[in-house]
Amino acid sequence: MGKIFLFVFMIFGFFGAKSQVNADFREVKEKFQHHRTMLETEFNKKQNQLTKSGMMELVNQQKEYFLKKLDSVENAALVATLVKVKNLEDLSRTFPRNSDASKIEDSKTEALAKYPGGIDAIRNFISEHLYTDSVNFEEQEKLSTKVKFIVERDGSVSQVKASGNSASLNRQGEIVLYLLPEKFSPAAINGVPVRSNYSIPITIAKN
């Protein structure tokens, strides 16, 4: 797994389209976490039974193999969810619910969007949950992407879009931002929540 270096900054602007809550991603994550817990429980039982038989190494190898397979299947499910969510977001922009859907405010915020725990919390989450096994380095030693998204008025994340020198890293960067477990405190103008842009560069290097 590559070592991840993250540099975070924010760009702010204001928009008006429907919020996309990441409930679909949470549902997939919770489903596979349930399967992972059951798998680990069964292997732990087997390990306890074979403690004195000299078979522990084999059991550990089998456990690692099955968990890696589960990670791969989970990632495939998350990629499918990403496609679904992006399609829904494209439709919401194509058929906005009100005439202000594409309006951009020029006013400056009095309060910027903030994530619980700050930028360090985002950085730590990305480092722990970015699925690097699906990232293709090819001949490169370092890959980078810039993930842009919108913090909605309710603090949820929407319209996540990554651009960089690796399509596989772009995809994983988009998935991990949709998976953020907490909502932001949204940006505000005169105390009124507004939609704002947020941008996070991600760099990952081979070990």
Image (spheres, helix red, strand yellow):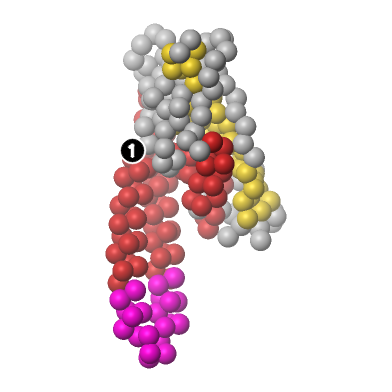
Relative to 98, 124 lies left or right:
right
Relative to 102, 143 lies left or right:
right
Q: Which residue is label 1 attached to?
A: 23
Dot 1 amino acid type: Ala
Tell me the quarter of the picture where residue 154 sits. top left
Q: Is residue 170 visible?
A: no
Task: Residue 95: say if magenta.
Answer: no
Q: Quadrant of the C terminus?
A: bottom right
How many numbered callouts?
A: 1
Residue at 45% across / 13% down in the picture? Answer: 191
Image position, residue 197 (x, y; %): 54, 24
Task: Residue 47: say if magenta.
Answer: yes
State the residue in front, 152 or 193: 193
Task: Label 1, secondary structure: give it.
Answer: helix
Tell me the quarter of the picture where residue 10 sits. top right
27 is higher (above) or lower (below) than 70? above
49 is higher (above) or lower (below) than 154? below
Residue at 42% across / 10% down in the picture? Answer: 100
Q: Please state the extent of the stretch shown in magenta in the rendering.
A: 43-64
Residue at 42% across / 52% down in the picture? Answer: 75
27 is higher (above) or lower (below) than 57? above
Image position, residue 89 (x, y; %): 40, 28
